[in-house]
């Protein structure tokens, strides 16, 4: 049954060193929403940009556009949650600033919300042009995430439209280290998925490199899964079986009176077991560091200044 709604759409746009894209994305979104007679506000979140991003946002001078500037770079997750906290609409859309998420899809997503869907997930038809190594690592990461948390994020993106109830549910989550793509699925609610083709960047270069991507993957994997901890247990069982087999072989050789050199085998076993112990301690240490980050309860972001009316809470 179609539910009639005439509520404002809040569009959240995280921006980090995107001075060449701010005007383009604001213009495209305004044109699309005005053509479809959708009441809206646009909220740019400047995530500690080092270029002229804030100056461009500050110069937009539009009653429907607001800006929030962080004191430094806190990351995209912090920018998204700052936008969610500042949004006043009864539905909220998150979209990238580089126009790889097509604004022309917004009216369709808004239409699904009008029909009663509370989470509208835009999923990628393909991952675009990526290296073989990158695709392999991505596939492994998404497979582990899906198998350990039952959340499918292999084609997910941050391009989502959320009902106010879903937004409030996300804002009530106490953790400081967040993964928006997975959390927006974890909270539940009535969800529909639509596909989109990733467009090339209109300007500038991607802010992600292999180091950031690996750090992002490890952080989110440990936030949503205990698979690395389980891996240590699995490795321990394998070594226990291996030790039993080797011990049995040694006893048989000793009973038969055969001499064993032993030294190379002993050194090799010590090195292997020692390596796995160190890896295990490293994994446990990483989880402890995550706990340490959470219990400090520092804010996800710090706001330096704002443009336009806002009542966001840090």
Image (tube, rainbow, N blue to C red):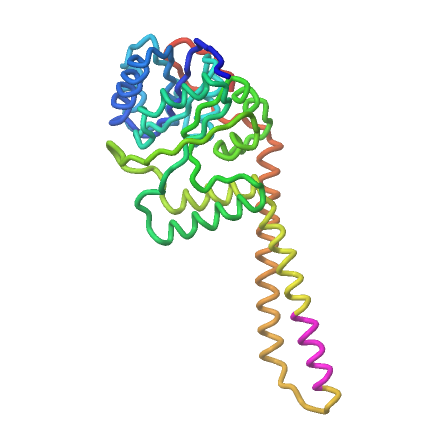
Q: Is residue 144 above or below residue 171?
A: below
At horizontal 46% and vertical 22% (from top left) the residue drawn is 82
Q: Is residue 244 above or below residue 292?
A: below
**Dominant secondary-structure state across the stretch colored magenta:** helix
Residue 16: horizontal and vertical position, in percent? 35, 29
Q: Is residue 225 magenta?
A: no
At horizontal 44% and vertical 21% (from top left) the residue drawn is 112
Is residue 233 rendered to the left or right of residue 65?
right
Q: Can the viewer see residue 76?
A: no
Q: Closer to the camera, 273 or 88? A: 88
Q: Is residue 220 above or below residue 165?
A: below
Q: Can the viewer see residue 143?
A: yes
Q: Is residue 273 above or below residue 112?
A: below
Q: Closer to the camera, 267 or 283? A: 283
Give residue 34's quadrant in the image: top left
At horizontal 72% and vertical 84% (from top left) the residue drawn is 252
At horizontal 31% and vertical 19% (from top left) the residue drawn is 29
Which residue is outermost to the right? 255
Residue 40: horizontal and vertical position, in percent? 38, 12
Residue 193: horizontal and vertical position, in percent? 45, 31
Which residue is outermost to the front? 1
Q: Closer to the camera, 32 or 66? A: 32
Give residue 6's quadrant in the image: top left
Residue 103: horizontal and vertical position, in percent? 32, 24
**Total number of numbered discs in the rendering:** 0
The stretch of residues the image draws in magenta is: 242-253
């Amino acid at each position: 049954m179609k539910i009639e709604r005439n509520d404002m759409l809040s569009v959240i746009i995280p921006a980090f060193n995107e001075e060449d894209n701010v005007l383009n994305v604001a213009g495209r979104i305004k044109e699309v929403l005005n053509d479809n007679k959708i009441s809206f506000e646009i909220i740019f979140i400047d995530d500690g940009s080092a270029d002229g991003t804030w100056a461009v946002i500050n110069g937009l001078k539009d009653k429907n556009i607001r800006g929030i500037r962080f004191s430094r770079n806190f990351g995209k997750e912090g920018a998204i949650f700052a936008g969610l906290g500042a949004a006043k609409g009864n539905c909220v859309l998150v979209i990238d600033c580089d126009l790889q998420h097509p604004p022309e899809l917004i009216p369709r997503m808004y239409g699904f919300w009008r029909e009663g869907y509370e989470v509208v997930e835009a999923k990628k038809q393909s991952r675009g042009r990526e290296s073989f190594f990158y695709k392999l690592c991505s596939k492994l990461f998404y497979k582990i995430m899906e198998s350990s948390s039952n959340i499918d994020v292999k084609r997910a993106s941050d391009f989502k439209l959320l009902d106010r109830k879903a937004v409030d549910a996300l804002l009530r989550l106490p953790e400081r280290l967040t993964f928006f793509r997975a959390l927006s699925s974890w909270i539940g609610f009535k969800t529909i998925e639509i596909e989109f083709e990733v467009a090339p960047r209109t300007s500038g270069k991607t802010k992600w490199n292999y180091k950031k991507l690996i750090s992002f993957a490890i952080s989110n994997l440990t936030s949503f899964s205990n698979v690395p901890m389980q891996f240590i247990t699995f490795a321990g069982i394998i070594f226990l079986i291996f030790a039993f087999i080797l011990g049995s072989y040694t006893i048989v050789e000793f009973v038969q009176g055969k001499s064993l050199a032993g030294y190379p085998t002993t050194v090799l076993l010590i090195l292997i077991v020692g390596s796995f112990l160190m890896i295990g301690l490293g994994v446990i240490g990483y989880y402890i560091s995550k706990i340490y980050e959470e219990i400090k309860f520092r804010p996800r972001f710090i706001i330096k200044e704002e443009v336009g009316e806002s009542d966001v809470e840090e």
